[in-house]
Amino acid sequence: MTSPLHQKIKVTGPVVVTANRLTDGAVIYRTASGQWTTELPGAAVVTTSDAAMALLTAARAEGVRVVDAYVAPVDLSHGKPRPGNLRERIRAAGPTIRLPAPEAANVHVCA
């Protein structure tokens, strides 16, 4: 069985490499300069399997800063990258539920 780290990536359109930042869970994207950004338009967009694998390999090497790096589709029909599927639209927009107010998170229950 082939390790997920060594599997061939099939790219059929424009893609980016995305992950979550370990410090706060924010959705981040790999840039052409090898950095990370929280802004999708700043991500490196590639269209070949080799280019996607190169970005992904470099991203996964930073396992101390990021978690679960993977290749995600993007839509370029509006002139700048936009999430290319429902999962990525949800990740980019944030949680789909209302989060508790910050003061509610600090409530302590005494037994």
Image (cartoon, rainbow, N blue to C red):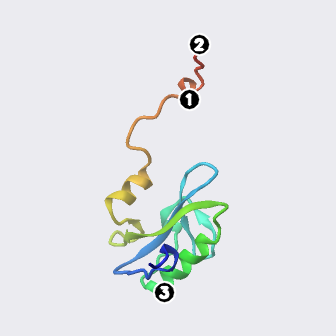
Query: Of residues 3 and 92, which is closer to you in this image?
Result: 3
Q: Dot 3 surroundings within 10 Å: few (below 14), some, or many (20 or more)?
A: some
For disc 1, the marked residue is: 102
Q: From the viewer's perspective, is residue 89 above or below residue 14?
A: above
- Left or right: 7, with 25 as reference point: left
- Outermost residue, right side: 64
Q: Is the residue marked by circle 1 packed among few (<14), some (14-19), or many (20+) residues within 10 Å?
A: few
Q: Spatial distance from mark 3 to mark 1, Cα to Cα?
A: 44 Å
Q: Residue at x 48, y 66 (%)?
A: 41
At 55% from the left and 82% from the top, the residue drawn is 54
Label ID, residue 52: none
Q: Earlier in the sequence, mark 2 or mark 3?
A: 3
Expressed as whole percent of the image width and height from the top left, the position of residue 71 reads 45, 71
Q: Which residue is mark 3?
A: 50
Residue at mark 2: 111
SS assignment at label 3? helix
| Residue 38, quarter of picture | bottom right
Q: Which x, y percent locates residue 35?
A: 63, 69
Q: In which quadrant is the N terminus drawn? A: bottom left
Gap between marks 2 and 3 measured at Cα: 58 Å
Secondary structure of the residue carrying tag 2 is: loop
Give neighbour class at mark 2: few <14, some 14-19, many 20+ (Cα, 10 Å).
Answer: few
Q: In this rendering, is residue 95 above or below 61? A: above
Q: Give the amino acid at mark 2.
A: Ala
Left or right: where 11 falls relative to 17:
left
**Dot 1: what SS?**
helix
> Between disc 2 and disc 1, whose residue precedes?
1
The three-letter amino acid code for the residue at tag 3 is: Asp
Front residue of 83/106: it is 106
